[in-house]
Amino acid sequence: MSLEDFNAGLRVLLKTPPPPVQRKFKPKPKAEPPKEQK
């Protein structure tokens, strides 16, 4: 992976708005036990 590819990737990430999927990762109610706990 070259520096140019890395910089290009960074620019794409900066231009791309945060995916709405992040909103789903809000803390769930305590009634639901965390499933991702390992």
Image (spheres, rainbow, N blue to C red):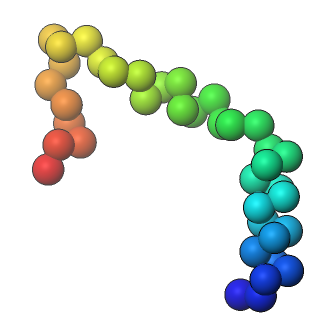
Q: Is residue 3 above or below residue 33?
A: below
Q: Nearer the viewer, residue 36 or 18?
A: 18
As drawn, 15 above or below 12:
above
Figure label count: 0
- Viewer-proximal residue among 7 and 32: 7
Residue at x 25% of width, y 12% of height: 29
- Observer-nearest of 31 and 17: 17
On screen, residue 33 versus residue 36, left or right, reads left
**Which image quadrant is residue 8 in?**
bottom right
Q: Is residue 37 above or below residue 20?
A: below
Q: Position of residue 6 (x, y in %)?
A: 76, 74
Q: Is residue 26 left or right of residue 1?
A: left
- What percent of the width, then of the height, locates residue 34? 19, 31
Where residue 10 sits, quadrant-wise, is: bottom right
Is 1 left or right of 34, judged from the image as shown?
A: right
Query: Where, quadrant-wise, is the N terminus in this rendering?
Result: bottom right
Residue occupying image coordinates x 30% and y 18%: 28
Residue farthest toward the bottom in the current orientation of the protein = 2
Question: Could you say where residue 21 lies in the image, as x and y percent from the top left?
Answer: 57, 33
Q: Which is more toward the observer, 19 or 4?
A: 4
* Residue at x 20%, y 36% (from the top left corner): 35
Q: Specify the quadrant of the image occupied by residue 7.
A: bottom right
Residue at image position (48%, 26%) is 24
- On the rendered structure, is 38 left or right of 1? left
